[in-house]
Image (tube, rainbow, N blue to C red):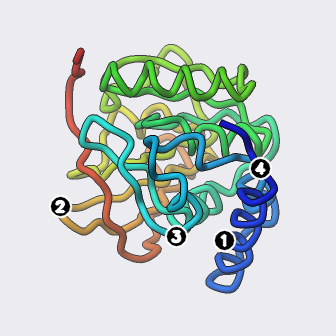
């Protein structure tokens, strides 16, 4: 599939609308402007790719709506070359946005079918820097910790303690917490046992699940 002038025009219009809703960091919108969202969704939904809505990607999962991707990326408040852990690779779209922001991306996905899909999507578009892992997001990636940022793309029942331990001092975790509807939390690690939490609105995500799925 190509990234046509029509796709680019729709993407530009979407980002213009997003910029009217919130004062996003310019790096976030610039990165989203470079990532062809239509290449990450299911075939046949191309005409919906640049609407501000979630869309199915298979395995009963969805690609987050663009506003959600933008707000989560913005709340990370990271700088180029910072190391970030993404929990829930999905189809790889958010991963690509983080890579375009110049971040060193580590991403973990619990569903093998999506893990393989994300690999295929990212490689086909030339995103070779993100490191993808098949595993349980609740465990994170302690081998590669600490991370300056941790972003969860699924609704957690609570804040996983294992992930807090993998957050660098001075780092930020962006995590939706709750059942059904989630509160978007930003957790800043101020010291070894000192954390500051702020809330940033209500959102709706697919639930975060334990273990892995090999289907």
Give the class, few, some or many, for how many residues have Cα within 10 Å of label 1's Cα (few <14, many ≥20). some
Asked whether the residues under the numbered discs 1 and 3 touch, taking CB atoms below 8 Å apart as contact, a structural biologist would say yes
Closer to the camera in the image, 188 or 17: 17
* Quarter placement of the N terminus: top right
Residue farthest bottom in this picture: 20
Closer to the camera in the image, 106 or 143: 106
**Cα distance, mark 1 to mark 2?**
29 Å
Disc number at residue 14? 1
Which tag is nearer the camera, tag 4 or tag 1? Answer: 4
**Chain-order first, disc 4 or disc 3:** 4
Question: Residue at horizontal 77%, vertical 65%?
Answer: 9
Secondary-structure class at tag 1: helix
**Residue under label 4:** 4
Question: Residue at horizontal 43%, vertical 46%?
Answer: 152
Question: Residue at horizontal 78%, vertical 49%?
Answer: 34
Q: Position of residue 62 (x, y in %)?
A: 36, 49
**Residue under label 2:** 179
**Cα distance, mark 4 to mark 3?**
19 Å
């Amino acid at each position: 599939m190509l990234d046509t002038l029509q796709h680019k025009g729709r993407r530009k219009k979407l980002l213009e609308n997003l910029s009217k809703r919130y004062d996003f960091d310019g790096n976030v919108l610039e990165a989203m402007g470079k990532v062809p969202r239509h290449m990450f969704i299911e075939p046949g939904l191309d005409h919906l790719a640049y609407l501000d809505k979630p869309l199915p990607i298979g395995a009963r999962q969805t690609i987050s709506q663009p506003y959600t991707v933008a707000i989560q990326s913005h709340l990370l408040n990271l700088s180029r070359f910072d190391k970030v852990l993404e929990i829930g690779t999905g189809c790889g779209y958010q991963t690509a946005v983080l890579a375009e922001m110049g971040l060193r991306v580590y991403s973990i996905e619990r569903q093998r079918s999506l893990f393989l899909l994300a690999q295929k999507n990212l490689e086909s578009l030339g995103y070779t820097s993100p490191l993808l892992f098949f595993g349980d997001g609740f465990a994170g990636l302690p081998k590669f910790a600490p991370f300056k940022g941790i972003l969860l793309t699924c609704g957690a029942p609570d804040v996983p303690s294992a992930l807090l331990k993998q957050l660098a001092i001075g780092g930020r975790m962006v995590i939706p917490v709750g059942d059904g509807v989630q509160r978007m939390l930003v957790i800043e690690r101020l010291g070894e046992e000192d954390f500051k939490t702020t809330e940033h609105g209500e959102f709706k995500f697919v639930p975060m699940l334990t273990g892995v799925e090999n289907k």
